[in-house]
Amino acid sequence: MISETSQNQSLSLNKNTGLTTQKDEPKMKKMIKYEVELKQENLKYYQIKNVQAHVWKFSEYIKEDPDKTLKSLKGFSKKMKRLEIACNELRTPNIGLKAISKNFNRMTCLQTLDLYSKSLNDASKVGTKSIFRNLKRLTSLLKINLDLTRLKPASDNELKILNKSLKKLTNLKSINLKFPPLTGEKGLQILSECIQKVALLQNMSLDLRACGRITSEDMESISHGLKRLTSLRILDFNFQGSHEITESKLKTLGEGLKGLTSLETINVNFQGNNFLGFLSGLVALKKTLKANVFLWSFSCNPSDCSEIQDETLKKIIEGLSQFTSLDSLSLDFPACNRITEKGLKSISEGLKKLTSLHSLSLNFSHCSKIDSQGVESIGEGLKMLTSLRTLNLHFQSMESAISATSLNSISEGLKGRICLQSMTLDLSW
């Protein structure tokens, strides 16, 4: 926020603001209250015409006229190094976003651009297109974060506009892209084309949660685009909600990564039905590449439990044991009547190797063949999870009531857990 010293300074106001005299100072302060947070500790004066702050953050609720107020800020750009647009209640920000984007050519020092989905809602399609179209003007941009998940499903034509601009940003070193829902058949393929043009890229994060099904052709396009990124060091994938990530598709992805000699780290998050195929593919990927492959979160909630049995749980744990840095694990198998205490014992043995876990959720409610011995074994597995912060255990309505021995085992497993912040135990019968 602006210091007391800076508030007492005279305001030199840009003609674009419409505020040109000292009597407009209260109005200016009101606009600042709603829209602008300046982050620079030793800001000595506040000068609109020649902005001295490095960061502009549109983070407060704009309660009056969002288009007008955003448009009034379009001139404050010449020395800006970071622009973050995250307005929570921009209902119709088209004019404002267009005004900012058309002023991109003046942002000659801008290095980081953040656009968050809270500001890019259904009503902002026109403004968002203008942002896409004018991105190519930001020739000094080094890092871009685009969260498009709240947009209406994006057409191929809209993505082509974004593609053309990203191709021009040849100095980019970091891209964080959260994809929107896609209506066209070639959305991911279009965006993959631009990846190979950014030759200096070192860090890339692709969040595919909103995309739904990812086809083999999509994965081939992503793999082909990655081949050209010889400077890439860190690669993040979020496949949560992408239910069609198979072993063969991960193998295709691996083909694109083999030649990246600078690649050091691959970070992966997964949630979906095809968990066995995904794990097999990821383990194979880890063995193929020289880069470190980290699985940070793993969640599975199968829609059909008829084929889930003890051997399934054993394979899951065997796969997960290859990724000891796992931070979050969720196994949701309610009413799976082919799972017994043997399957829970496999999980218990696997937990002893996953010592980095911060969050664990196990749901085996209404599994009619699980008894107290299975729950007791989970207590044994908890003993090694010294970093655990969140624990959810659901074992209600099983074959028989939970015994006192089982409860004591869980209690012993959690003894001394000073890091534990949240716990849910549902063991009712």
Image (cartoon, grey):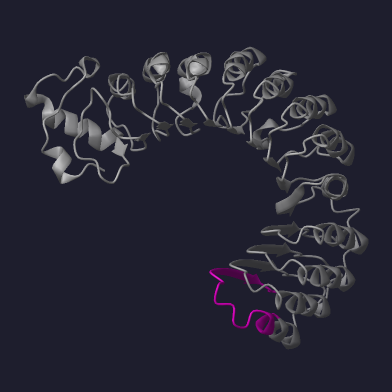
19 relative position to 300: left or right = left
Residue at the spot 77% in from the left edge and 38% down from the top edge: 261
Provide residue 108's location: percent of width, then percent of height. 41, 21
Provide residue 64's location: percent of width, then percent of height. 27, 28
Residue 162, quarter of picture: top right
The region drawn magenta spans: 410-428
Taking the magenta stretch, the answer to whether it contains residue 47 is no
Residue at the spot 71% in from the left edge and 58% down from the top edge: 330
Relative to the observer, which residue lies in front, 231 or 366? 231
Q: Check the image and report above or below for 367 versus 117.
A: below
212 relative position to 168: left or right = right
Provide residue 230's location: percent of width, then percent of height. 73, 31
Provide residue 400's location: percent of width, then percent of height. 80, 78
Residue 233, quarter of picture: top right
Q: Quadrant of the C terminus?
A: bottom right
Residue 187, quarter of picture: top right
245 relative position to 166: left or right = right
398 relative position to 411: left or right = right
Q: In which quarter of the image is the N terminus?
A: top left
Relative to the observer, which residue lies in front, 367 or 183? 183
Q: Check the image and report above or below for 178 versus 415.
A: above
Taking the magenta stretch, the answer to whether it contains residue 426 is yes
Relative to the observer, which residue lies in front, 423 or 50? 50
Residue 326 seen in render: yes
